[in-house]
């Protein structure tokens, strides 16, 4: 076991937790939060390989910065979408938004 | 080092798992905040100081507020036209994830990772030079995305004017 | 100490103020005012700093040149120049502008377009300052044209008056005539020397190498390139500075608001012409030594200046509009300056330019104060009796008059005019300038006495004058400052202490001997006395009683007076010759446009239309049927596929995850690499 | 010249070094491994003690000053001049019954005040209170401060939501809206300081403000045009961030009883108060650090006064300003609040960002150009202010009243 | 311009802050228990019983226990028991006096009706306002001894009103003396008259029936 192992394990665990939220929880807000968690897991991987990896320079750090910024934008737009959906359907269950089914 | 990181990983993971399992949305959101704080501490322990503070600022200061706001604004209405979600689907989802998790876990723990010395710290100034130098275009693009997201969020969440015939 | 590379800040400040003012919403009335004042004050400070620096090394021409663009092998270069001439002029321009700006705040307080006014003023001053610090004839021309544009906007500021609109147009078109010569001269110069920079470390057009080359280029008829270029550039100055025969726009420019007149006549526009001639003086003087040249450039300048000096003074005698009298007096004084340049005393010209700026600004602002108080009445016959009502304005106006007519010893105009006359007396070529100058002195004294008597003495002869009262403090403050300046500005260049002369030339100038020129001084003093006495005898002794009464001069010599009052029919002459020519050319152009070019365009259009018709027929009948059939098939297939779209987002995701799991399986254990 | 007898550098003065000497004396006998930990504990204890006392006497000072402004004496019964009043209040709060509503979310209801106080305190760790007097030195300490501060409104939300009281919940919503609105100008107003100082570290920022122009005019950021604008925006946003009047909407007593404090009593209530004052003090301390030169003395001749005293004086002045403002202005409406932020403070801060950038880019302008630099910077503050102020107050002319027609 | 009003407001509060330290016109607070407020003369609160002298308040009460006030009191906070015997009042005339006179100030609403109905000017309004007590029966239920206050005190708190009352009482007393003197003179002249009964008949009932006047047979009191 090395620190890298721990980081990667935490990352995988967080990713799976987020995936469970996305797949199982019916609430759109929780689904979005699950996506955020998966993004965090990815960020953690970048950090881990920047710190303990074979030395790829600072690209990992910079990438994480961009990732955080984009995640913030994603959360803002996602929540706005949730509110818009709630206004139309009076619910935020993901399953309710199926008007486009073929 | 490994032990410290393992403890911090648990501190971070437990609230995350709890957040997914808890029924109360507010509790769930607050537990997510706790998980994010844990992650920030984890970053700090790993040595990514700037990332840790940026992460805390964005997630604890920004995203959590948006989430809480959304939760309060979208409390379930009187009439929910859908049947409750089926348990079978939930089991299916968990099973799928379990598959992925087991594979990821096994691959991580069975791989012999080369144990390398941590690389020297990157100073904040260097990070700034990187952002303003090679990654300038990316920085500008992110700024553009944030602006578009801000305006898009406003347009999406703003109630329709009556004159536009919206059904809000 | 302002380095030459930062000189651009001086014009840039008012330019920025003008830009912001132009972009500001119309409701923000005060913002452009505030900005303009702040910017011009900043420019003044910077100019003073620059002047201090320039005076420390008067002979050095500090330049900062840069390449504007490169076309082929030719690089067009611009630059900034710091020398005592430019710095002194910019201090003068900024100082007068500050006072005029302050005056304008009160003068135009009620005007709804106050913001626009100050925006234009800022642009005007910015262009003038740019002209002063330019080290390139091209840059100078750019600013020169900007000055023209701003003057057009300002003279036509009250564009809802037909007369103002016409005056603006006239000023613009007539100065353009001169600018044509300027442009040609610039092109010729650039062709001949390959540079438009004044000073460029030995390679500039005003430095010895280029001058020798120009003087050595001999054209048919004995002319040299230097003479030709000098005369063409002088044509530009003739237009801008209102010299004979292009002086007609200047009196008409009185249609603009009075502060604009003050600015045009004192500091910015007309000074540009004199400044140009002073700036390119080495070029003008390049042909001096050559006997083969039929007419030296400077001789032409001196002759034109003499005629203008005399003509302006004569015409001023018969004008009744207060501001027109002052305008013709400006024409006359500018003639003096040109005369001075022509006889080789460009330093005296600049000296007179500066003193003239002070007292002419004072006189115009004083008349503005009168006009403002008398409810926009500017006919001196209907004024009168203001001496008691507007004591402060009266006293300052008297001081300005004293400076203009050149009352001896204390007033600034005396010293600068003496310097010019002294130089004219010593000119070896002809005595015309000297005689014209002396005649002008008498006439100046006469018409200024007439103006003062008519306006201020006697009793009120009109509505406006009766209700007049002293102007507000904001208007009298600039008057006071300028009055002090009109007296004191002369002391920097007296024969006993030629500070200005030594600074401008960069070489020490010895103080003149006491006796030298004393006779001339006495003589011109006597002439001034004669002029004043004549004026007093005709107008001051028995002041006018009735506004409609005939002028004493008109009673005596009715025909001469009528001719002078009609301004010697210059406008009519131009309308009959140039105007008719232009109208004919315009008619020809209209005919060509309609029948020749119009026909070609119409034919092209018809051809294109026919091609389009053919195209459409092929498209509709041939291609469309086949596409319809293909689309039907596509639609049916799509309906089949769309059943897979259940609308359940999480269902999709589940499928994705299963796929991910399979992929991972393959990657980890399947040996797929 | 006059202080020829004084040490060559003010940093060597005895008073100046007193805290460090004291620390070394207290930890000197310990083994090397333990020393940094004990030193950290000592600094924590000092900060807690000083700011605890500051909190106690801030409440008293606020009551006295408010009283004087309203022409009454304020508390003067407990001890001489009422100096024991804070302790009386503390005893009262401690002995009161702690009531928890039955419907409340017990855990969150308990956690909210604790979290709030903790979060209000941890920001103080990176403030340099004097020369060499900073608890934690790190590279991105400004970011740390704001990351720590960002979570405080979360605690207020917890308090409001956990009370299960509609007034409390409304207060929670307001708190969130206020935070989102004012976090943006607060951070934006700090960015030009970071750009000009070229560092995210508080010690570097204070060091960058050392020295005097012409020996008289300190190089503090608040004394430059852009810095003054940023300082003003920062202070307004800080008022809103610490929920102080006139931005005290979350606890608007005339509308929401006591907002998120409605269901709190006894010691928990006192904790909320403590958090409010600590947050105020922390933001003021940050403002002193960023804009008012931190511990730098205003004049060179005054450098013999130790640096931490200067810091304290500036901090107290800012806190006095908070009280003064509270005594003066009425509370804003929620729409006015958000409007002020998004339509005025944010654009002003954005323009100021450019202004600060220009300032940083023209750092080498000297002599006459320095005057121009000032001029440009002042123009970049005044012109946007005029335009924004005009558009902001466009809807608030003389008020016209309309009555229902019969 | 935005900010002008804000600065003006700040200036106003700053002026108050500074002014409250040196300007008595701004700083109007009186430190109450140490500095007692100066009450306006017309201020009234809770009734008290007027006695003529301070030395012997119980002996010189003006109250004759007529019980009018007890009947009129709206909240019925007055309780009176008449004495069995009679005591000479200030004028020396024998009168019934209140054996018990109690007012429950917890109930009293200071309406002043008792004062207005009293024919003897025996009950007047006090200026007492700080009567807080830990026990309402001990502290707030006032008995005869606690209620009685000398006429001098009445002069002290309501000087104008008290002087009027004294003047009126003195005038009545003089009128009664005059009448008594006339009656005595008539009585002395009656034996000489032809019809003594006819002369005495209108005189005596008129004297005894004059409203509100206590016929003082003795010499006028030197006090008051």
Image (cartoon, rainbow, N blue to C red):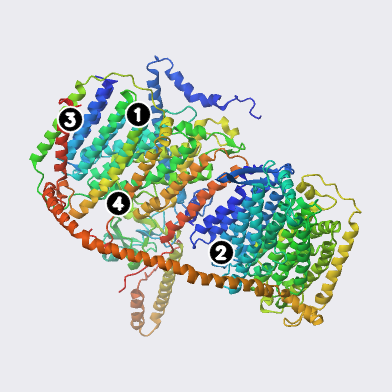
The tag earlier along the polypeptide, 2 or 3, is 2
Label 1: element kind: loop
Label 2: element kind: helix
The residue to which callout 2 is attached is C114
Front position in the image: D256 or D233? D233
Q: Which mark is residue C664?
A: 3
Q: Residues within 10 Å of mark 3 (few under 14, many from 20)?
A: some
Relative to C429, residue D141 above or below: above
Q: Nearer the observer, disc 3 or disc 4? A: 3
Q: Nearer the observer, disc 4 or disc 2? A: 2
Q: Which mark is residue B48?
A: 1
Q: Residues within 10 Å of mark 1 (few under 14, many from 20)?
A: many
Chain label for disc 4: D
* Marks 3/1: CA–CA distance: 30 Å
Q: Residues within 10 Å of mark 4 (few under 14, many from 20)?
A: some
Front position in the image: D127 or C320? C320
Residue under the image location 69 percent in, 79 percent down: C462
* Marks 2/3: CA–CA distance: 75 Å
Task: Residue D55: give x, y in percent of width and height.
Answer: 40, 37
Chain label for disc 1: B
* Marks 1/2: CA–CA distance: 59 Å
Chain label for disc 2: C
Label 3: element kind: helix
């Amino acid at each position: 076991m090395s620190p890298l192992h721990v980081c990667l394990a935490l990352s995988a665990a967080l990713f799976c937790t987020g995936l469970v939220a996305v797949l199982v929880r019916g609430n759109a807000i929780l689904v979005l939060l699950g996506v955020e968690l998966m993004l965090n897991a990815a960020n953690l991987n970048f950090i881990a390989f920047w710190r303990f990896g074979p030395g790829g320079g600072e690209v990992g750090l910079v990438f994480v910065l961009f990732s955080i910024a984009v995640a913030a934008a994603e959360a803002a737009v996602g929540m706005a979408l949730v509110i818009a959906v709630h206004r139309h359907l009076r619910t935020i269950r993901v399953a309710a938004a199926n008007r486009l089914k073929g | 080092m490994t032990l410290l990181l393992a403890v911090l990983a648990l501190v971070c993971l437990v609230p995350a798992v709890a957040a997914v399992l808890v029924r109360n949305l507010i509790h769930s959101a607050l537990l997510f905040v706790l998980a994010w704080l844990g992650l920030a501490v984890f970053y700090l322990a790993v040595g990514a100081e700037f990332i840790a503070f940026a992460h805390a600022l964005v997630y604890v200061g920004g995203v959590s507020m948006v989430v809480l706001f959304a939760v309060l604004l979208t409390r379930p209405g009187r009439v929910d036209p859908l049947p409750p979600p089926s348990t079978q689907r939930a089991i299916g989802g968990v099973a799928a994830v379990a598959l992925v998790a087991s594979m990821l876990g096994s691959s991580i723990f069975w791989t012999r990772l080369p144990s390398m010395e941590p690389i020297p710290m990157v100073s904040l100034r260097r990070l700034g030079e990187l952002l303003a130098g090679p990654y300038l275009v990316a920085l500008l693009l992110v700024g553009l995305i944030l602006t578009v997201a801000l305006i898009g969020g406003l347009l999406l969440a703003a109630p329709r004017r009556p004159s536009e015939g919206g059904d809000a | 100490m302002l380095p030459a590379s930062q000189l651009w800040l001086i014009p840039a400040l008012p330019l920025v103020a003008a830009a912001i003012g132009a972009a500001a919403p119309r409701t923000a009335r005060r913002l452009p005012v505030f900005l303009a004042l702040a910017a011009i004050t900043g420019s003044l400070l910077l100019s003073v700093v620059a002047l201090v620096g320039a005076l420390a090394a008067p002979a050095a021409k500090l330049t900062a040149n840069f390449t504007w663009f490169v076309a082929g092998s030719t690089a067009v270069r611009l630059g900034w120049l710091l020398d005592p001439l430019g710095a002194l002029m910019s201090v003068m321009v900024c100082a007068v502008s500050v006072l005029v700006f302050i005056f304008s705040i009160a003068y135009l307080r009620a005007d709804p377009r106050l913001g626009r006014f100050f925006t234009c003023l800022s642009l005007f001053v910015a262009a003038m300052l740019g002209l002063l610090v330019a080290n390139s004839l091209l840059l100078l021309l750019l600013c020169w044209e900007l000055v023209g544009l701003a003057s057009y906007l300002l003279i036509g500021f009250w564009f809802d008056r037909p007369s103002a609109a016409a005056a603006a147009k006239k000023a613009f078109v007539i100065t353009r005539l001169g600018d044509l010569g300027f442009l040609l001269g610039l092109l010729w110069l650039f062709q001949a020397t390959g540079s438009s920079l004044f000073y460029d470390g030995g390679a500039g057009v005003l430095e010895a190498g280029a001058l020798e080359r120009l003087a050595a280029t001999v054209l048919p008829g004995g002319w040299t390139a230097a003479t030709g270029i000098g005369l063409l550039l002088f044509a530009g100055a003739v237009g801008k500075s209102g010299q004979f025969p292009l002086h007609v726009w200047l009196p008409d420019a009185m249609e603009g608001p009075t502060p604009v007149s003050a600015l045009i006549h004192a500091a910015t526009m007309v000074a540009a012409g004199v400044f140009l001639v002073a700036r390119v003086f080495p070029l003008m003087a390049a042909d001096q030594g050559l006997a083969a040249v039929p007419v030296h450039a400077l001789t032409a300048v001196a002759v034109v200046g003499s005629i203008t000096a005399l003509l302006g003074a004569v015409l001023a005698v018969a004008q009744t509009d207060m501001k027109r009298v002052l305008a013709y007096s400006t024409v006359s004084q500018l003639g003096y300056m040109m005369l001075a340049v022509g006889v080789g005393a460009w330093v005296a010209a600049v000296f007179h330019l500066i003193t003239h700026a002070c007292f002419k600004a004072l006189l115009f602002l004083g008349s503005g104060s009168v006009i403002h108080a008398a409810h926009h009445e500017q006919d001196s016959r209907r004024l009168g009796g203001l001496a008691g009502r507007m004591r402060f304005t009266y006293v300052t106006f008297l001081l300005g008059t004293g400076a203009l007519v050149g009352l001896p010893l204390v007033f600034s105009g005396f010293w600068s005019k003496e310097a010019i006359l002294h130089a004219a007396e010593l000119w070896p070529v002809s005595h015309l300038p000297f005689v014209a100058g002396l005649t002008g002195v008498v006439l100046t004294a006469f018409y200024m006495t007439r103006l003062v008597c008519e306006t201020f003495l006697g009793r009120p002869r009109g509505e406006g004058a009766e209700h007049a009262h002293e102007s507000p403090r904001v208007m009298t403050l600039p008057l006071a400052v300028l009055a002090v300046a009109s007296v004191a500005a002369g002391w920097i260049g007296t024969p006993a202490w030629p500070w200005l002369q030594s600074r401008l030339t960069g070489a020490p100038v010895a103080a003149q001997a006491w006796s030298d020129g004393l006779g001339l001084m006495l003589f011109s003093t006597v002439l001034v006395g004669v002029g004043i006495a004549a004026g007093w005898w005709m107008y001051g002794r028995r002041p006018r009683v009735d506004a409609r009464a005939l002028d004493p001069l008109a009673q005596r010599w009715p025909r001469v007076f009528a001719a002078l009052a009609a301004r010697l029919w210059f406008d009519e002459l131009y309308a009959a010759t140039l105007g008719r020519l232009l109208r004919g050319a315009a008619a020809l152009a209209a005919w060509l446009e309609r029948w020749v070019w119009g026909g070609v365009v119409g034919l092209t259009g018809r051809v294109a239309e026919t091609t389009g018709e053919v195209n459409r027929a092929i498209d509709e009948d041939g291609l469309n049927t086949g596409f319809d059939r293909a689309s039907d098939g596509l639609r049916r297939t799509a309906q089949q596929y769309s059943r897979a779209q259940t609308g359940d987002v999480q269902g999709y995701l589940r499928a994705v995850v299963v796929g991910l799991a399979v992929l991972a399986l393959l990657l980890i254990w399947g040996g797929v690499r | 010249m006059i202080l020829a007898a004084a040490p060559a550098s003010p940093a060597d003065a005895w008073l100046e070094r007193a805290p460090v000497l004291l620390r070394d004396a207290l930890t000197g006998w310990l083994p090397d491994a333990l020393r940094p930990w004990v030193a950290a504990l000592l600094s924590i204890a000092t900060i807690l003690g000083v700011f605890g006392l500051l909190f106690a006497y801030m409440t008293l000072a606020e009551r006295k000053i408010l009283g004087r402004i309203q022409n009454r004496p304020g508390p003067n019964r407990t001890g001489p001049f009422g100096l024991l009043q804070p302790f009386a209040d503390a005893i009262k709060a401690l002995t009161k019954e702690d009531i928890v509503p039955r419907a409340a979310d017990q855990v969150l209801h308990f956690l909210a005040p604790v979290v709030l106080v903790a979060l209000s305190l941890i920001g103080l760790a990176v403030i340099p209170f004097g020369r060499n007097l900073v608890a934690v030195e790190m590279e991105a300490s400004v970011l740390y401060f704001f990351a720590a501060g960002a979570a405080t409104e979360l605690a207020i939300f917890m308090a409001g939501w956990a009370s299960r009281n509609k007034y409390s919940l409304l207060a929670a919503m307001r708190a969130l809206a206020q935070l989102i609105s004012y976090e943006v100008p607060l951070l934006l107003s700090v960015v030009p300081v970071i750009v000009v100082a070229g560092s995210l570290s508080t010690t570097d920022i204070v060091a960058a403000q050392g020295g005097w122009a012409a020996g008289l005019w300190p190089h503090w950021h608040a004394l430059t045009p852009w810095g003054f604008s940023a300082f003003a925006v920062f202070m307004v946003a800080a008022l809103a961030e610490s929920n102080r009047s006139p931005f005290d909407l979350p606890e608007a007593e005339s509308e929401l009883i006591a907002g998120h404090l409605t269901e709190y009593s006894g010691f928990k209530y006192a904790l909320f108060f403590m958090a409010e004052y600590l947050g105020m003090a922390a933001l003021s301390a940050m403002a002193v650090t960023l804009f008012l030169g931190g511990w730098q003395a205003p004049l060179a001749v005054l450098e013999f006064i130790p640096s931490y005293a200067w810091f304290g004086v500036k901090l107290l002045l800012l806190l006095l300003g908070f009280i003064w403002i509270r005594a003066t202005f009425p509370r804003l409406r929620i729409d006015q609040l958000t409007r002020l932020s998004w339509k005025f403070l944010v654009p002003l801060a954005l323009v100021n960002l450019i202004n600060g950038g220009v300032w940083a880019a023209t750092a080498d302008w000297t002599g006459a150009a320095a005057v121009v630099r000032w001029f440009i910077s002042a123009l970049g503050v005044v012109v946007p202010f005029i335009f924004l102020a005009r558009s902001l107050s466009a809807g608030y002319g003389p008020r016209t009243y309309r009555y229902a027609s019969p | 311009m935005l900010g002008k009003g804000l600065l003006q407001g700040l200036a106003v509060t700053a002026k108050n802050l500074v002014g409250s330290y040196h300007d008595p016109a701004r700083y109007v607070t009186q430190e109450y228990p140490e500095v007692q407020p100066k009450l306006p003369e017309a201020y009234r609160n809770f009734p008290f019983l007027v006695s003529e002298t301070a030395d012997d308040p119980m002996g010189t009460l003006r109250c004759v226990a007529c019980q009018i006030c007890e009947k009129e009191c709206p909240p019925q906070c007055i309780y009176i028991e008449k004495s069995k015997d009679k005591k000479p009042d200030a004028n020396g005339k024998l009168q019934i006096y209140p054996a018990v006179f109690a007012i429950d100030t917890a109930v009293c609403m200071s309406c002043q009706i008792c004062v207005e109905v009293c024919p003897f000017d025996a009950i007047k309004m006090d200026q007492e306002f700080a009567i807080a007590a830990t026990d309402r029966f001990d502290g707030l239920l006032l008995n005869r001894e606690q209620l009685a206050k000398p006429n001098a005190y009445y002069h002290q708190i309501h000087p104008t009103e008290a002087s009027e009352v004294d003047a009126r009482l003195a005038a009545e007393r003089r009128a009664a003396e005059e009448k008594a003197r006339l009656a005595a003179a008539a009585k002395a002249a009656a034996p000489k008259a032809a019809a003594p009964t006819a002369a005495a008949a209108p005189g005596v009932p008129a004297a005894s029936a004059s409203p509100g006047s206590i016929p003082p047979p003795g010499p006028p009191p030197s006090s008051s």
